[in-house]
Amino acid sequence: MSLYNRILVPVDGDAPASHALDHALAIARDQGARLKLITVLDKGVADYRGAEVGWLDREKWHEELRVHASATLESAGERVRAAAADVPVETEVVDAPKGGVWKRILQAAEDWRADLLVVGTHGRHGVDRVLLGSVSEALVRHGHLPLLVVPAHEEAQSGGS
């Protein structure tokens, strides 16, 4: 019997998420688990950008973000299938209201009945963390399922090359 059967991984195309996906894939192979990859569209960011440049068509901007998110997910899914054809993988783009990214990640994990959540983190500190927020920190504080937070610079921190 495996400890983890359903592993949820938020991906957004950046290095920390890619590193987290590597870890999730290794765990999935070891445990015989399924993977679900999600990308969360923060509607608040799109709305803010639209308001910032008044001439921008908000609906078109939302659609462009969705197309980009779908491409990111497709690429991540193909990466999983190429590395481990025996690991079932599914993908989904989910929408979040302004500031609700971590809530939507937790909701997606609950809806899918995930056993483990694997996320990457930039490891920001000080003003950067205050200004940009920390999705991984919110997941640690508010989540109720096992969570693996993978640092972006894990090799540098552990003394590896």
Image: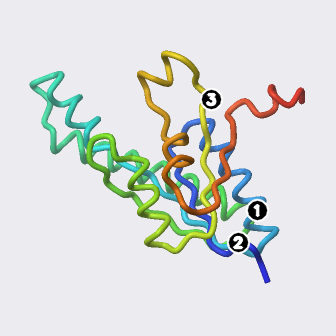
Residue neighbourhood size for the residue with mark 2, other residues' Cα within 10 Å, grouped as few (<14), some (14–19), many (≥20):
some
Q: Which mark is residue 45?
A: none
- Per the image, the residue denoted by label 3 is 123
Mark 1 or mark 3: name the one nearer the start of the chain. 1
Q: Earlier in the sequence, mark 3 or mark 2?
A: 2
Count neighbours of disc 1 (C-alpha within 10 A) and say few if under 14, some if 14 to 19, many if 20 or more. Answer: some
Q: Where residue 24 sits: x, y (%)?
A: 69, 57
Q: Type of residue at label 2?
A: Tyr
Q: Which residue is mark 1?
A: 27
- Element assignment for label 3: loop
Asked whether the viewer can see residue 49, the reply is: yes
Tell me whether the residue at label 1 lies in contact with that at label 2, contact meaning CB atoms closer than 8 angstroms: yes
Quarter of the view holding residue 115: bottom right
User: Which image quadrant is residue 42 in?
Assistant: top left
Front residue of this view, candidates 1 and 11: 1
Query: Which amino acid type corresponds to the residue marked 3 in the rendered image?
Result: Gly
Separation of residues labelled 3 and 2 (CA atoms): 26 Å
The residue where tag 2 is placed is 4
Q: Tell me the distance, in whole angstroms, between the alpha carbons under discs 1 and 3.
A: 22 Å
> Image height check: is 14 above or below 69?
above
Instruction: Point out residue 107 in the picture as x, y percentages from the top left corner.
Output: 41, 62
Residue at image point 31% right, 54% down: 95
- Determine if residue 161 is in view: no
Q: Earlier in the sequence, mark 1 or mark 2?
A: 2
Q: Which is in the foreground here, disc 1 or disc 3?
A: 3
What colouring method underlies this structural image? Answer: rainbow
Camera-near label (1 vs 2) is: 2
Give the residue at x 64% y 72%: 34
Rendering coords of residue 147 (x, y %) = 63, 55
State the separation of the CA atoms marked 1 and 2.
8 Å
Left or right: 161 in relation to 96: right
